[in-house]
Image (cartoon, rainbow, N blue to C red):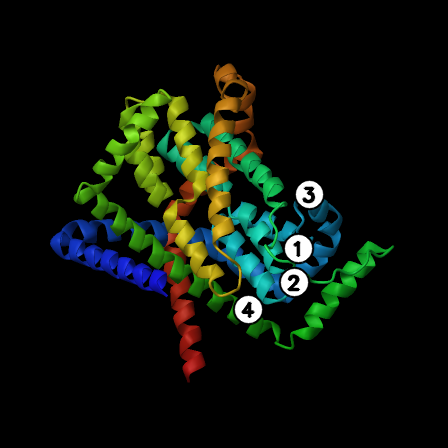
């Protein structure tokens, strides 16, 4: 009881200080909130909305059940999660955070997975998408397409390692697990039957399913936008009142112990709160070597930043999935990704940095190079797509209230 009271007092005090800082520096708060809103409006909303809607529909149509049956022989031995985790992993990789958390929570709500399986699954399916790593970070910030291959390799290989580690995560006390059906001889037929059963259990017509998928997806994205604005302002306030400088002073000795430039410490702290701002600031440091910049960016990409972690915590709060295993997995992923960046630096970047190199050819291959164009295209039409989607959402809400 006393711990709860102390926790409440601390949270209330910090929130009050945050509110006072905004009143003291309203201009800085407005500029930072506008920066966060622009990022959500032009990039986050239009890039995540299609994946959220499609994933909702695939769950309704039973496609996730179909994939789950087929992927069970793979996902269960490797990660100790059901086969439907393969769908969550693929969608999380393609669309980026917090899609993995949203889909994991949805499977838990549908009683498709147990709590411990959900905690294992969310720990390695909530990752950055290739569009952000290869487009925004490597090309947009570093102006170096080859570096994106290294960052992506370290990020996704690190996620696989985290999945292997989290397979040993279990409940402190034995709980009743969800019964798994025995494997059938004809796996395809069994998967199709499961998909048909899921569709029969949902009596809603297609139009209703489509409308609900759009509404639920936009509601989630509105929540994500609120967190982005909040942490954008928080990050700016920490810098305005020199709190970031104080924390950087404490961490400088640790970074210098490993030979890192002290100039990279403040951007690293910013990246712990918001990865986009941190990645951009790290790319602008002139006193740090490229390997040092790549290692720190790999860490904050894997750590996700407190902004994304708050989004995940909000999504998981609707279920009984605990947040602590996810947080520990993010710290673990951060160090693994940074270590892999150092290990892979020589074979993937340093040894192939000349003209006609393997990495350069891979980065310019049509299967990869389209991402760079897609990023520029997203910046062009993203705002318009967000505006049209929000108008459609308001129309759906108005029809519901009539």
Report which residue position mark 1 lands on.
84
Contact between labelled residues 2 and 4, with CB atoms less than 8 Å apart? no
Kindly tell me whether residue 373 is visible in this rendering.
Answer: no
Residue 193 spot, x, y in % from top left: 78, 65
Asked if disc 2 and disc 1 are in contact, CB closer than 8 Å, the reply is: yes
Rendered view: 352 above or below 371:
above
Residue at x-position 34% and y-position 26%: 255
Q: Residues within 10 Å of mark 2 (few under 14, many from 20)?
A: some
* Residue at 69 percent of width and 43 percent of height: 78
- The CA span between labels 3 and 4 is 34 Å
Left or right for 54, reference 334 = right
Indicate which disc, 2 or 1, sits on the residue closer to the N terminus: 1
Q: Which residue is at the front of the view, 35 or 73?
A: 73
242 left or right, relative to 86: left
**Sooner in the amino-acid sequence: mark 3 or mark 1:** 3
Question: Label 3 belongs to which residue?
Answer: 78
- Residue at 55%, 58% (x, y): give it: 103
First of labels 3, 4 by sequence position = 3
| Front position in the image: 170 or 310 | 170
Category of crowding for the residue at label 1, using alpha-carbon neighbours closer than 10 angstroms: few (below 14), some (14–19), many (at least 20): many
Q: Which residue is mark 2?
A: 112
Q: Position of residue 48 (x, y in %)?
A: 47, 53
Residue ranking furthest to the front: 2
Residue designated by label 4:
210
List x then y, in percent, for residue 42: 36, 51
266 in relation to 67, above or below: above
Residue 34 at x, y percent in the picture:
25, 52
């Amino acid at each position: 009881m006393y711990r709860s009271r102390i926790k409440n007092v601390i949270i209330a005090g910090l929130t009050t200080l945050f509110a006072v800082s905004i009143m003291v520096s309203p201009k800085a708060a407005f500029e930072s909130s506008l920066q966060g809103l622009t990022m959500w409006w032009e990039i986050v909303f239009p890039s995540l909305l299609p994946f959220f809607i499609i994933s909702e529909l695939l769950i309704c149509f039973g496609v996730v059940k179909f994939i789950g049956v087929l992927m069970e022989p793979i996902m269960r031995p490797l990660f100790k999660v059901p086969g439907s985790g393969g769908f969550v992993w693929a969608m999380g990789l393609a669309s980026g955070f917090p899609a993995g958390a949203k889909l994991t929570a949805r499977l838990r709500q549908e009683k498709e997975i147990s709590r411990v399986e959900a905690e294992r699954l969310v720990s390695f399916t909530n990752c950055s998408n290739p569009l952000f790593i290869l487009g925004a970070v490597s090309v947009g910030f570093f102006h170096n397409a080859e570096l994106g291959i290294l960052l992506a390799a370290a990020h996704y290989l690190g996620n696989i390692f985290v999945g292997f580690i989290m397979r040993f995560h279990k409940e402190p006390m034995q709980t009743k697990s969800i019964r798994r059906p025995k494997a059938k001889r004809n796996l395809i037929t069994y998967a199709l039957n499961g998909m048909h059963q899921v569709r029969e259990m949902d009596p809603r017509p297609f139009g209703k399913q489509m409308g609900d998928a759009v509404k639920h997806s936009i509601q989630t994205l509105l929540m994500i936008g609120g967190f982005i604005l909040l942490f954008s302002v928080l990050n700016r306030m920490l810098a305005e009142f020199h709190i970031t400088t104080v924390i950087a002073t404490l961490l400088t000795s640790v970074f210098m112990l490993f030979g890192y430039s002290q100039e990279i410490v403040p951007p690293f702290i910013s990246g712990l709160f918001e990865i986009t701002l941190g990645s951009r600031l790290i790319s602008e440091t002139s006193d740090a070597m490229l390997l040092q910049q790549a290692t720190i960016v790999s860490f904050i990409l894997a750590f996700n930043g407190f902004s994304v972690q708050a989004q995940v915590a909000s999504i998981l709060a609707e279920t009984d999935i605990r947040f602590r295993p996810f947080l520990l997995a993010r710290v673990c992923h951060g160090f693994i990704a940074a270590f892999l960046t150092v290990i892979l630096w020589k074979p993937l970047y340093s040894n192939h940095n000349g003209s006609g190199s393997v990495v350069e050819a891979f980065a310019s291959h049509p299967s990869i190079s389209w991402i760079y164009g897609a990023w520029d295209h997203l910046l062009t039409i993203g705002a318009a797509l967000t505006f049209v989607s929000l108008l459609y959402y308001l129309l759906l809400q108005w029809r519901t209230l009539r």
